[in-house]
Image (cartoon, grey):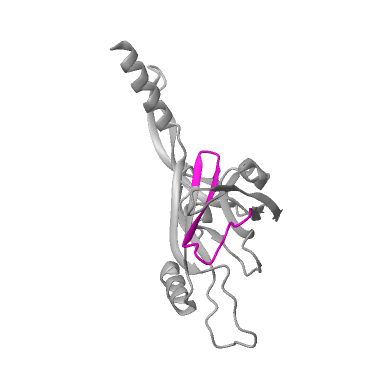
């Protein structure tokens, strides 16, 4: 019984320490699709998926007041993964671009600190490497806040009796938020074929796992409709 309870506690602890998994899924045009030369009529939909989330680690210390009461750190954030236009003769290479947010600047000091991989339909997991990354952007905002501050007043000097009054005190809140973009490269023989129905792009690091599942279609019109639905 003791061993069973110990094992149960260890499993619960492991589950509690696991990453927070965020997901997005949508249908996009197959990366091997090629437009005919001179074709200007066929739709050219973006191959992009977005995870919309809030940075739940932001602490609001005081009541926010004024017109700047909704800093970016408290708004809905869009973390995207996109397969940009590219040419792969035999499906052995693929670029994916990603944008991440964090309210801790150290989590975005180097996009190489994250693990990237591509899950294929045949069960393979292809490790990705950072090909290029842009500088970290600072979206931090300082705005006015207010809180009730205590104020002690002596009521009776002879007895030392005091009374506590509360008054509104203006303070300044700082809401930290940063973002960074990177292009990840994947390379493996036979990674993509015309029969590939989907791939899942995974980003893992700092107790978060982001999973973007790209379902492929060969119909540009269908892909455009899906892109519009996903954005909405």
Q: Is residue 200 magenta?
A: yes
**In this picture, is 4 found above or below 65?**
above
Query: For the point 49% across and 64% down, which residue is it?
Result: 195
Percent from the top left, x then y, of residue 28?
49, 68
**In this picture, is 82 found above or below 142?**
below
**In this picture, is 33 found above or below 190?**
below
Question: In the image, 72: left or right of 183?
Answer: left
Q: Is residue 179 magenta?
A: no
Q: Nearer the viewer, residue 189 or 24?
A: 189
Question: In the image, 110: left or right of 215?
Answer: right
Query: For the point 38% across and 26% down, which residue is it?
Result: 11
Magenta residues span 188-209
Percent from the top left, x then y, of residue 221?
46, 79
Question: In the image, 81: left or right of 150?
Answer: right
Percent from the top left, x then y, of residue 83?
58, 64
Query: For the point 36% across and 19% down, which residue is it?
Result: 7
């Amino acid at each position: 019984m003791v061993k069973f309870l110990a094992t149960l506690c260890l499993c619960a602890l492991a589950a509690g320490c696991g990453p927070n998994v965020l997901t997005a899924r949508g249908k996009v045009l197959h990366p091997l699709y090629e437009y005919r030369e001179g074709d200007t009529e066929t739709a050219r939909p973006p191959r992009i998926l977005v995870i919309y989330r809030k940075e739940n680690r932001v602490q609001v210390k005081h009541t926010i007041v004024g017109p700047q009461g909704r800093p970016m750190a408290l708004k809905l954030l869009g973390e995207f993964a996109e397969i940009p236009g590219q040419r792969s003769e035999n499906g052995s290479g693929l670029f994916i671009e990603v944008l991440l947010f964090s309210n801790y600047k150290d989590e975005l000091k180097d996009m190489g600190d994250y693990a990237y991989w591509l899950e294929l339909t045949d069960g393979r997991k292809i490790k990705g490497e950072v090909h290029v990354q842009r500088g970290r952007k600072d979206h931090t905002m300082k705005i006015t806040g207010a809180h009730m501050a205590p104020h002690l007043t002596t009521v009776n000097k002879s007895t030392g009796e005091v009374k506590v009054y509360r008054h509104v005190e203006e303070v300044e809140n700082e809401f930290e938020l940063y973002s960074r973009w990177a292009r990840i490269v994947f390379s493996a023989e036979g990674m993509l074929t015309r029969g590939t129905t989907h791939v899942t792009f995974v980003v893992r690091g700092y107790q978060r796992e982001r999973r973007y599942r790209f379902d492929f279609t060969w119909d540009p019109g269908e892909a455009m409709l899906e892109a519009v639905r996903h954005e909405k």
